[in-house]
Each structure stands twice: as C-alpha cells, then as structure tokens.
Amino acid sequence: ALLLPDLLDAPPARPLPDLSGAAASAYLFLESAFAWWGLEGALGPLRTLAECERSSPDAYRHLAAFAGSIYGAALGAGFIYLVGEAFGRLLRLEEGVSAMGFGDVKYMGFVGAMTGWQGVVVSLLVGCLAGAAFGVASSIGSGRPRLLGRDLEEARTPLRRFAVWVTGARGPAGPDEEVPLRPFTGLFARIATGDPHVPFGPFLSLGAFVAAFWPGALPEALRLLSGR
C-alpha cells in the first residue's frame, strides 16, 4: 500500500484515513503541555504531517495508504484471533486450541493490509453470511433425523444446543438409545447431529473478493434494503 495507494483508495466506500486531521488534533492537544516544558520542537513531525496534505499531496497519499494498511491488518488479524480465543473458551476446547485456525488470522491480516479496515468489515460480513448458510445446509445434509442419547452430550455448539432444544429431546438415555422428539422437528435433529466443522477460509475469500473488486457492494445493498 505504501507503493501502490490505489489498492486502498476507493472512495466513497473505502477512503484513505485522515492523517492530517488526526495529526492536527494531536498537535493542538499536546501543544500547550509540550510548550510548558520547552519541548515544542518535539511536535515538529506532527506539524509537518498536519500540513503534508497541502504541501506534498502525493507523498501524503502514500503515507495515508500505508497507515490504512497497517490499521486494516491489525484489525483483521486481531479480530479473528480474539474471536477464536473467545469461542475456544466458550466451547471449552483443550488449552491452546482455538476455535479459529491461525491461518485465518494471517489471511485476514493480509486482507486488511490490502483493503483497509472497511475491507475487513465487508469480508467478515459476507464470509459469515455465506458460511452460516452453507454450514446449516451441510449439517442438514450430513445429519440424522433421529437423536440418540450420546447426541445430547455432544451438542456443545450454540447452534446444536438450539436445535436440540427445539426438538424437545431430553435425557437420561443410553448412548445408543433413541430419544423421543417433538413432531415435525426431524430437520432440527439433522442440524443437531450434522457435521459442525466447516472451513471458514473459502467464505472469507469470497468476502475478500467482494471487498477488493466491488467495494461499494455492501453500502449499496444496505441502501437498497433501507429503501433509500
């Protein structure tokens, strides 16, 4: 992004960060304190950056793209890492095991570096929606229309627990003993017993493709849904 600012600069959906505005605000906030200590010269870089947009617009554009790239990489990698750690604890996985693969962390860092924080948001929204739809369809296709006693103990994910709750299945029951269900809840039994492991990477890639080559897709979709 430092060499090719066009990778991030795609207004209005993906504008560059306002470095000059941020530097000017920081300068005004710190100026009196630094002047009181006789260190106002230390704020020279902030003053230069605040004026850079007018004095050297081309250099400023490269710096702004670089800052947006760093911010996007930190947001993308950090968010996926924290989500993986949080759900790992929530689902009581083994110590050191994350609910998200570390490859997803590195990949979203790359996506954020190339498309900025706005691209991270688009990638995650598209990826989550597409992944959720595929995950439910995969669970239905791989699950069973009946629940066994062991299924009640293995329903550890929120979606599986919800599906078991809808079926009304309750123990105690032996591991291979069939558990009675409410009428017409076989679909939810399939969700509760289907394969819950769906790779997230392909759906993040779909979101990254939309963010990189169609940055205005999400704002346009929200505009159409709101009727504006």
Image: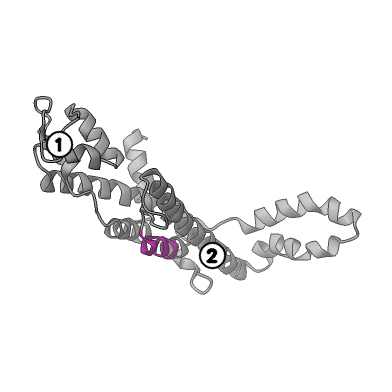
Magenta stretch mostly in which secondary structure?
A: helix
Tell me residue 163's x, y (percent).
21, 34
For residue 90, what is the image quadrant? Answer: top left
Residue shown at the point (35%, 45%) measured from the top left = 91
- Image quarter in which the C terminus is found: top left
Residue under label 1, please give it. Answer: 174
Q: Which residues are magenta?
A: 101-111
Q: Is residue 105 magenta?
A: yes
Residue under label 2, please give it. Answer: 65
Could you tell me if residue 11 is visible in this image? no
Residue shown at the point (13%, 38%) measured from the top left = 148
Q: Residues within 10 Å of mark 2 (few under 14, many from 20)?
A: many
Tell me residue 119's x, y (percent).
42, 56
Label 1 secondary element: loop
Q: Is residue 24 magenta?
A: no
User: 167 and 149: which one is in front?
Assistant: 149
Tell me residue 123's x, y (percent).
36, 54
| Tag 1: amino acid | Gly
User: 173 and 129: which one is in front?
Assistant: 173
Compared with 14, 187 (above or below) is above
Mark before the other along the chain sequence, 2 or 1: 2
Label 2 secondary element: helix
Tell me residue 125's x, y (percent).
35, 48
Residue shown at the point (39%, 55%) measured from the top left = 98
| Tag 2: amino acid | Ala
User: 101 and 118: which one is in front?
Assistant: 101
| 193 horizontally vs 21: left or right | left
For residue 222, what is the image quadrant? Answer: top left
User: 134 and 210: which one is in front?
Assistant: 134
Compared with 3, 99 (above or below) is above
